[in-house]
Image: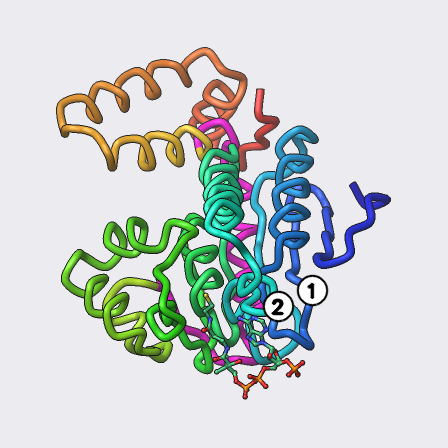
Amino acid sequence: MSTYTFETIRVEAESPIAIVILNRPDKLNALNRMLISELTAAFSLLVEGGQTRVAILKGSGEKAFAAGADIAEMGQLSSVEARRFSEEGHHLGAILESAPFPVIAEVQGFALGGGCELALACDFIHAGVRAKFGQPEVNLGVIPGFGGTQRLARRVGIGLARELCFTGKIIDASEALRIGLVNAVHAQEDLSAKVMELAALIAAKGPLAVAAAKRVLLRGEDMALSAANALEIEAFGGLFGSGDQREGMAAFLAKRAATFTGT
Ligand code: COA
């Protein structure tokens, strides 16, 4: 992975924590097709590599996580091409969601349009105090195309999602925290350290269990409660007999720290 070269992103794949950095700071990390394709490839490689227990997705530079899809590129798209672009963004979101490890969005500045949608496709968001969020696509005569209408509504509720999508207004980090769009807001200078601390905490847990929790929480959201509960029962039972389950419980009983191997 470390030898794999990308043009629009950087990947620091130090097992067990991978850091993926959107790297077009002069364009506020705007998401062009190459960046979407490279992010998709990078996360596919991390999944295939099997060494990653947590990934952090962040933007380079101080100003932006990502200020949206690349408007210069998008402005040239035909309807058919725009549909394809939207599908590519959705495919990336699905890869982030189906990855067997949590992906934390670290948002230090603007997360607008596709940037907000990308952060929403991560498991959760931690923000710096200067972060700003919004779905300003209506200003451009379009709507969110990378899952924003749906994931935003599921995260903050349909009323607030409607208001954000209809007005295109930008909200600050404290408002994002108040409505549950982000899990936590940190001092700007502490953000990366706090996110890394959280990633390390998760990376030390049983990876099969974390993956199962991620899967059940995600799939269950779209199910009737009874079906989602059945999914949980299956996943719970499925973890028994794994090396991690035996190690976790044996370590507790022996009053020592567990060492998980993901087997
Ligand atoms: N697509 C393409 N380029 C973008 C971009 C985007 N979504 N967002 C910013 N950029 C580019 C600017 O064109 C500019 O490039 P230039 O230096 O070659 O002219 C550079 O990034 C810096 O942006 P700039 O607008 O000068 O910074 P700012 O601090 O004045 O404003 C924003 C910051 C985020 C308020 C402003 O860039 C903006 O409104 N961006 C678009 C947000 C948006 O509508 N996103 C949804 C897209 S669907």
Q: From this viewpoint, which residue is outermost toward the right?
A: 3
Left or right of residue 258, residue 3 in this image:
right
Residue range (magenta): 182-209
- Name the amino acid, label 1: Asn
Q: From this viewpoint, which residue is outermost toward the top?
A: 241
Residue 46 position (above or below residue 176): above
**Which residue has dot 1 on it?**
23
**Residue at the location (26% across, 18% down)?**
233
Within the image, what quadrant is residue 262 found in?
Answer: top right
**Residue at the location (42% across, 77% down)?**
132
Magenta segment's dominant SS is: helix
- Name the amino acid, label 2: Asn
Q: From this viewpoint, which residue is outermost toward the front?
A: 78
**Which residue has dot 2 on it?**
29
Residue 263 position (above or below residue 58): above
Q: Give the x, y percent position of residue 103.
A: 51, 48
Quarter of the N terminus within the rendering: top right
Label 1 neighbour load within 10 Å: few <14, some 14-19, many 20+: many
Q: Quadrant of ligand 1?
A: bottom right
Q: Please report contact status of discs 2 and 1: CB closer than 8 Å, yes or no.
A: yes
Quarter of the C terminus within the rendering: top right
**Residue at the location (26% across, 31% down)?**
220
Left or right of residue 131, residue 223 in this image:
left
Q: Earlier in the sequence, mark 2 or mark 1?
A: 1
Q: Is residue 169 visible?
A: yes
**Residue at the location (67% across, 34% down)?**
51
Q: Nearer the viewer, residue 56 or 73?
A: 73
Asked if the stretch drawn in magenta spans residue 197, the answer is: yes
Left or right of residue 6, residue 254 in this image:
left
Q: Give the x, y percent position of residue 150.
A: 29, 49
Left or right of residue 209, residue 231 in this image:
left
Q: Nearer the viewer, residue 28 or 232?
A: 28
